[in-house]
Image: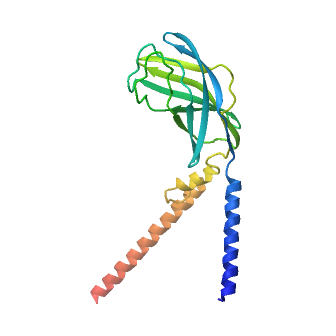
Amino acid sequence: MSYRTYQKRTAALAFAAALAGSAVLMAAPAAHADVVDVNYECKTPIGDKSAVSPIDIKSVKSGSGYKLTMSWQKGVSSSPVDLGKGAMSPSAVIKLGGAEEGTVAVSGPANAATIPANTPIKISDLSGTYTPKETGKVTFTADVLTIKALGTTTTCTPSNSPKPSLALDVTAAGGGSGETQSGSDSGGELPQTGPEDSAIALGTLGGTVLLAGAAGVLWLTRRNQAVRR
């Protein structure tokens, strides 16, 4: 191969790689995220309270689904007594909209440090997994927040009909899973779709046994003849 031919081939491969990279970027699912103010109305053991916190929901592709992370930029509710380390456990629900309806549960670790009395409770980042069941644009909106502490439960519900914090263009997971599952469940056996196939499979198995039996008889007959000689 001449040096000029080598240069041309290298340039062609580089161009093809660049096109492939562009195609991957173009095929990546579109995502749009906003920080949304959510007005929480909380039912607490000591009465009703309210607080507004900007909510951020982010996503990271993980296998056939997405890992969602829900973040609070301000604290909500408060406690009349100190909450020691590990005393408060938060969880929440993210509401789906658009191409798919439903909810995604998210949760997070308990408080890593003492929360002083009568101070806004800062919620740690909550995370959960979302696996698409439909194809299209799906929105993610902050919904009910639950705080459990010292044997009590506080429930905070958005009262201002917040707009979505995240929108994703998704593809339903497991497309064509019926055929794949059928193949994976076979366990290496012959596929059987009905009584006729079962009969054919049994007939084949029976024929194999009979042939093996005939071969065994023939081998014994020849062995006996050889011994007699």
Question: Which residue sits at x=52%, y=65%?
Answer: 204
Question: Which residue sits at x=56%, y=57%?
Answer: 191
Q: Is residue 225 left or right of residue 127?
A: left
| Closer to the camera in the image, 224 or 47 | 47
Q: Which residue is situated farthest in the top direction here? A: 47
Q: In the picture, residue 210 is in which quadrant?
A: bottom left
Instruction: Using the image, determine if residue 210 lies above or below residue 79.
Output: below
Label tally: 0
Q: Is residue 14 left or right of residue 43?
A: right
Its colouring scheme is rainbow
Instruction: Using the image, determine if residue 127 lies above or below residue 183.
Output: above
Q: Quadrant of the C terminus?
A: bottom left
Q: Quadrant of the N terminus?
A: bottom right
Residue 130, percent across and down? 58, 39
| Closer to the camera in the image, 207 or 41 | 41
Residue 223, percent across and down? 32, 82
Residue 206, percent across and down? 48, 64
Residue 62, percent across and down? 55, 47
Question: Which residue sits at x=49%, y=9%?
Answer: 46
Question: Which residue sits at x=65%, y=26%?
Answer: 37
Q: In the picture, residue 80 is in which quadrant?
A: top left
